[in-house]
Image (tube, rainbow, N blue to C red):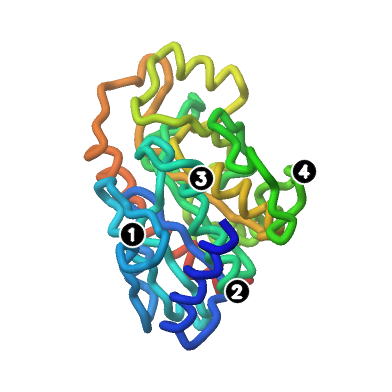
Amino acid sequence: MLNKIEETVKYISERIDKKPKIGIILGTGLGLVADEIKVSVKIPYRDIPDFPVSTVKGHKGQLMFGVLNGIQVVAMQGRFHYYEGYSMEEVVFPVRILKQLGIEYLFVSNASGGVNPEFEVGDIMFITDHINLMPNPLLGPNHSHLGPRFVDMSEAYNKNLLSKAQKVARHHDIHYKTGIYAAVTGPSYETPAEYRYIQTLGADAVGMSTVPEVIVARHMRLPVFAVSVISDLGVEGKIVEISHEEVVDAASHVAPLLKVIIKDLVKEV
């Protein structure tokens, strides 16, 4: 893996002229945030050595380097999921690359199903903690050059970044929730019984991404801010048949608000 990281970082570094400070992973339907970036370089995933390729609708599949609110950033328009058939090493590979390119913070977004009875479709949830129901991406030999064998997860989501995001949301009068995110493999959406199970575990929302990336970010000591857009509900009496297109549509409706939050939060750090 170390040789692949070195090769990929070399390829990208030769095509950019400034080191990004913040990495942003844009989840399903949330690519509108990228419109605010003054882009200097775009690199399609298919051109990057050893990089996976997005196969999911709503994920464009390119790295965007540029300036957002005066700060150098790199945005991933499209992420990779375990359910696509990628190994966990492949799923989290881009996070390792962004770290080696110089990012100091990682922002992650996703669309998820709300299991908290107080949530509604379109709510923005700042993630405070998670429950991992997927294979851990750190299984196998550890590369001490990247991080320690055993990773402390007592603060998976940086409290300082969370506080700043809440301040930004209040300043713009943007309604938000906070909560715990449960990660499952997918690609099937949850049954009513599974929704009840996940709620019983203590989660407020459930999705198919984010947690592997966060674990690897913490392995490399990257502070993380993460946010979910509640795109459907797994609450008794509110469960309806859902499609991926409807998830994308629900997330897209909230994207303008999330764009405001991310843009200002970038400046705050």
Question: Which corner quadrant holds the C terminus?
Answer: bottom right
Q: Secondary structure at mark 2?
A: loop
Dot 3 or dot 1: first in sequence order is 1
Q: From mark 4 to mark 3, how far is it between C-alphas?
A: 20 Å
Q: Are marks 4 and 2 in contact (CB under 8 Å)?
A: no
Q: Which mark is on residue 102?
A: 2
Dot 4 or dot 2: first in sequence order is 2
Q: Residue tagged by mark 3? A: 210
Amino acid type assigned to the residue bearing label 4 in the image: Phe
Which of labels 1 and 2 is toward the front? 2
Which of labels 3 and 2 is toward the front? 2
Q: Residue at 64% across / 69% down in the picture?
A: 104
Q: Secondary structure at mark 4?
A: loop
Which of labels 4 and 3 is toward the front? 4
| The residue positioned farthest toward the bottom in the image shown | 17
Dot 1 or dot 4: first in sequence order is 1
* Residue 249 x %, y %: 25, 45
Q: Residue tagged by mark 4? A: 150
Question: What crowding class fits label 3: few (fewer than 14 Cα within 10 Å), some (14-19), or many (20 or more)?
Answer: many
Which of labels 4 and 2 is toward the front? 4
* Depth check, front residue: 132 or 126: 132
| The residue positioned farthest toward the top in the image shown | 193
Q: Secondary structure at mark 3?
A: loop
Amino acid type assigned to the residue bearing label 2 in the image: Gly
Question: What crowding class fits label 4: few (fewer than 14 Cα within 10 Å), some (14-19), or many (20 or more)?
Answer: few
Q: Which mark is on residue 31?
A: 1
Which of labels 3 and 1 is toward the front? 3
Amino acid type assigned to the residue bearing label 3 in the image: Thr
Q: Residue at 27% across / 51% down in the picture?
A: 58
Compared across the picture, whether 256 is left or right of 132 comes to left
